[in-house]
Image (tube, rainbow, N blue to C red):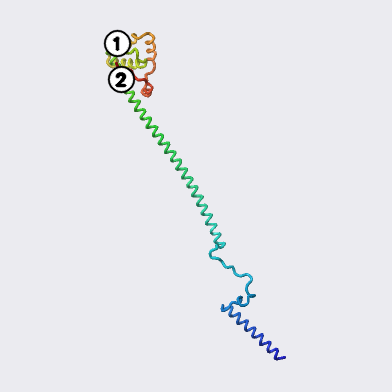
Amino acid sequence: MANKRLVTLLLLLIVFLSGAIFYFLDIIGVIKAESVLPFLASKNPAVIEDADFPTEVEKLEYRKWQEKLIEKEEALAKLESELASKVSDTEQKLREIEELKEGIIAERKKLEMLTRDWDDRQKKIKELAEKVTNMPPEKAREMMQNWRDFDIIEVLRQMDKDAATEGNPSITPYLLTLFTPERRAEITRKMLLPAIEPENSAELPALPAQE
């Protein structure tokens, strides 16, 4: 009986020592207990992170970065829209300025042309007035008979001016008596109207050719 107890005690001591040695070797990393005794493996193994797969923190940082990027893109789009609007307004104003400039140039050319035509007309009127003054009245009446009333009036007014400048009496009243009563009355009526100014000279008919 004593021998059996001794054997049992020795076996237990051997098992205990074996376990202690096994545990010690597992701790120092010489062996892995889970590989020798699978039932010792943990039921909840540690999660191994994949370096290529983002963590939750990285995902959060990425979302924040993405939101900031979207905000910058929206700000850029707004700025581009404002700049495009300003460019459009500037181009419109430049077109308006160019049109105004072209209009002024056209008006200036028109004014220059009217001034030139007016000067030419006044020169011709003065020449006709001198010619009529130096012609026999009856001959002058024959030449003027087919003129337009307006042309006759302009020449007669110039003759009055020349006579006043030279201190001589004007012969225009006498010339008018040589026309028919109807024509004389019409010319006299029109002579009472205001004289044509240079700005209206574009509407004037051409003077009769000198004979």
Where does label 1 land, which residue?
A: 139
Which is more N-terminal, label 2 or label 1?
2
Residue type marked 1: Lys
> Mark 1 and 2 residues: CB-CB less than 8 Å, in contact?
no
In the image, residue 122 lies at what x, y percent?
32, 21
Label 1 or label 2, whichever lies nearer to me, is 1
In the image, residue 52 lies at what x, y percent?
53, 64
Q: Residue 209 or 86: which is nearer the viewer?
A: 209
Residue farthest to the bottom, as pictured = 2
- Residue 38, picture quadrant: bottom right
Dot 2: within a 10 Å radius of its alpha carbon, few (fewer than 14), some, or many (20 or more) residues?
Answer: some
- Residue 20, picture quadrant: bottom right
In the image, residue 127 lies at what x, y percent?
29, 18
Q: Is residue 196 above or below residue 26?
A: above
Dot 1: within a 10 Å radius of its alpha carbon, few (fewer than 14), some, or many (20 or more) residues?
Answer: few
Q: As drawn, is 92 to the left or to the right of 132?
A: right
Q: Residue at x 62, y 74 (%)?
A: 41
Q: Is residue 123 above or below residue 45?
A: above
